[in-house]
Image: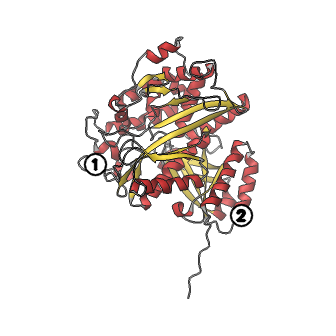
Amino acid sequence: MLNTPKKFLDMSYDELEELNLEAKHKVMNRTPEDQLQEEYMRYLSDKKELKAITVAFTDLEGRLHMLDYDKKFLLSSADNLTFDGSSVRGFSSVRESDLRLKIDWGSFRWLPADVFGPGKVMVFGLIQNLDNTAYESDWRSQLRLMTEMLMRDEQMTANVAVELEGFLFNGRNAEQRYTADGGFEFVSTGGYYHSLPQDPLRQFIDRFAEAQRALGFENEKDHPEVAPSQFELNFSYTDALICADQIQLYKLMARQIADSMGMTASFLPKPFADVNGSGMHTNMSVSRGGKNLFYDSADEDNLSTMAWGFVDRILNNANDLCLILNPSVNAYRRLDPAYEAPNQIKSSAIDRTSMIRIPLGNEKSARIEVRSVAPDTNPYLLFYTLFQTGFSGPMPEALDSESRRTRTRFLPDKINDAIRHFKGSEYLRSLLGEASHSKYLELKKAVAERSPKLLGSIIKTEEIRFHHEVTNQYLWSKF
C-alpha cells in the first residue's frame, strides 16, 4: 500500500517575505487587535495545509519557550490556553502554577519550512493571571502595555534597532558539553569582513540572512565580526515590541540553522578570554507622527533636550541597571577595557568605550546607542527599563555637555557587584514591582553562587553550563 503524501504548507522565501512584511506593517499601522484575530483565525481555518501553531513566550531571564498547538484545538480554545508556570524558572510557584496564554495576533508570522518544519506558523503569547490581567513577570506583556500607553497618551512610538553579535562553534550542543580544559572550537578564523565566501561561517551567515529576510526583518547588512567565528546580521529600525520579538527569533533561527549544519550558534558575551566578546548595541529614539523627537539641528551632536534627558537618566542609574543589561556571570568578562569594552559610565560621539555613544545622525537617524548591553539579556525587560528610565528615571544634578563626556565612573566588573547595586535600588524595586525584582535577584544570586567569585583568565565550566540560556533541569541538578 502506497503512503499518502503529506501536503503541509511549504512556501517560497519570496512569498514568506511578502506575507510577513504585510503582517508587520499592519501592526505598525495600528490595525485593531480584534480585526487581526478575525483575519488570522479565518486564515487558519481555511488553510488546510497548516497543521500546528507555535506559541512562544519568554521567561524572566529572557529564554524563549515554545508550545505547538494543533490547529483545530487552538481555533476552538484560543481564549482558554493555559500552561504550568511553576515549570519555568522565575515564574509562579507550585501552589499557584497555572497561567494563561493569550495570543498576540499581531505577532502572527509564517515560518520557513526548511528551518522550522513544514505546516507551521508562529505567534507570541501574552502571559496572564487566571483573572486575565497581565502577569507581572512577563516583560513582553509589560513592554506591550508601555508602548500602547505611549501611543494612546502621547502619540509617541518607541523605536529600536540592535546590533546583535554571536559566535559559531564546531559541533552540536557545544555549550552544554563545555569544559574549562577543552573550551570551544572555532569554525573559522577568517576575521572581520574577509572570511572566504564559502567557508563555514559565511555559509551559515548566508543561510541565516535568507531566513531572516523571509521573516520580514528588513535586512540591512551582515558580516563576520572582529573575533574568529563571530557574526552580526543587522536589521532595520522598528517598534520596540517588534524589535524584541525579532531578537528572540534571531537567536532561535541562528541556533536552529547552526544545528542543522552540525554547529552551535552561541550568544555568550565572552566565550574566549583573549578575543573580543559579543554585545548587543541598542539604538533608541522616540518619534511622533513620523517626526524624530531625538533630533535637534541646533545641538552640536544633533540631539534634542528630550534625548539628552534620556542619556542623563540612563547614566545616572547605570549601576542599578547593569544586572539587566548584563545578566550573566560571563557578561562581566566583556566589560574588560582591554577589548574596547563600553564600561565607562559616560556618553561620547567618538569614544566607543563609553556606555552611551551618540552616532552621527540627521533628522531621520538621530538616536542614542547604549553599548553596554550583552546579547543574553531579556530584550523585553531591557527595552522596558531603558525607556522607562529614559522618560522618568531619577535625574542627576545638572550636567553640562563637557561633564557628560569627562566625568568617569565604571560599570561593575563582576556579577556580585551588579547584584549588590540591583538589590539596593529602590528605583528598580518600584519600577519592576517587588515580586519581579525579588525573583530576578534570586535567580542571579543562584547562578553567581554556583560560579567562582573571581573571573580570572580561564572561562570556567560553571559560568557556561549554568548560564540561563544554556542550563536545563538536568545540568542544574548536576552541581
Circle nearer the N terminus (2, 1): 2
Q: Amino acid at mark 2?
A: Ser
Single out the mark in the foreground, 2 or 1: 1
Could you tell me residue 108's position as x and y percent?
Answer: 65, 53
Q: Is residue 468 visible?
A: no
Which residue matches tag 2? 45
Split into 4 quadrants, where in the image is the N terminus? bottom right
Residue for badge 1: 183
86 or 209: which is nearer to us?
A: 209
Is 31 rendered above or below residue 43? above
Residue nearer the viewer, 313 or 12: 12
- Where does residue 417 sit, x and y in percent of width and height? 36, 27
Q: Horizontally, is 422 left or right of 155 in the view?
A: left
Q: Is residue 221 visible?
A: yes
Q: Is residue 48 left or right of residue 322?
A: right
Instruction: Tell me whether the residue at label 2 lies in contact with that at label 1, contact meaning CB atoms closer than 8 angstroms.
Output: no
Which SS class for mark 1? loop
- Numbered marks: total: 2
Of residues 268 and 283, the one nearer the viewer is: 283
Classify 10 Å Cα crowding around label 1: few (below 14), some (14-19), many (20 and above): some
The percent position of residue 46, horizontal first and vertical second, equals: 72, 65
